[in-house]
Image (tube, grey):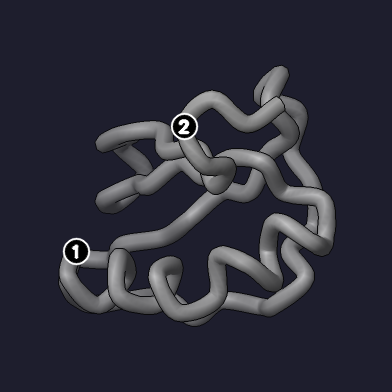
């Protein structure tokens, strides 16, 4: 299994990440990585991330705090 992230603006437009991710072997590893680098990703222009497992979309998560525009 391969877990990967796609980096997006709030409208879903894909952007290049400020920090280049690896391919992860577990969901937990992928989520830990985003937890470590979310501020850098946000500062680099990504406002949300989408997690995929072997090409299947699992979920979309905002990198912004709740209520922040």
Between 1 and 8, the one nearer to me in the picture: 8
Between 68 and 49, the one nearer to me in the picture: 68
Name the residue: 55% across, 75% down. Answer: 37
Q: Which mark is residue 66?
A: 2
Q: Quadrant of residue 56?
A: top left
Q: Quadrant of the C terminus?
A: top right
x and y, in percent, of residue 49 in the image? 52, 45
Q: Is residue 29 left or right of residue 42?
A: left
Q: Which mark is residue 27?
A: 1
Which tag is nearer the camera, tag 2 or tag 1? Answer: 2
Q: Quadrant of residue 61?
A: top left
Between 23 and 20, the one nearer to me in the picture: 20
Name the residue: 19% across, 64% down. Answer: 27
- Residue 62 lies, with reference to residue 52, above or below; the image says above
Q: Which mark is residue 45?
A: none
Q: Residues within 10 Å of mark 1 (few under 14, many from 20)?
A: some
- Residue 8 lies, with reference to residue 3, above or below; the image says above
Q: Residues within 10 Å of mark 2 (few under 14, many from 20)?
A: few
């Amino acid at each position: 299994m391969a877990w990967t992230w796609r980096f997006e603006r709030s409208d879903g437009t894909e952007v290049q990440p400020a920090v280049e991710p690896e391919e992860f072997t577990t969901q937990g590893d992928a989520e830990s990585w985003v937890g470590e680098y979310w501020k850098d990703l946000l500062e680099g222009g990504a406002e949300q991330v989408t997690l995929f497992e072997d090409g299947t979309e699992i979920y979309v998560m905002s990198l912004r705090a709740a209520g922040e525009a």
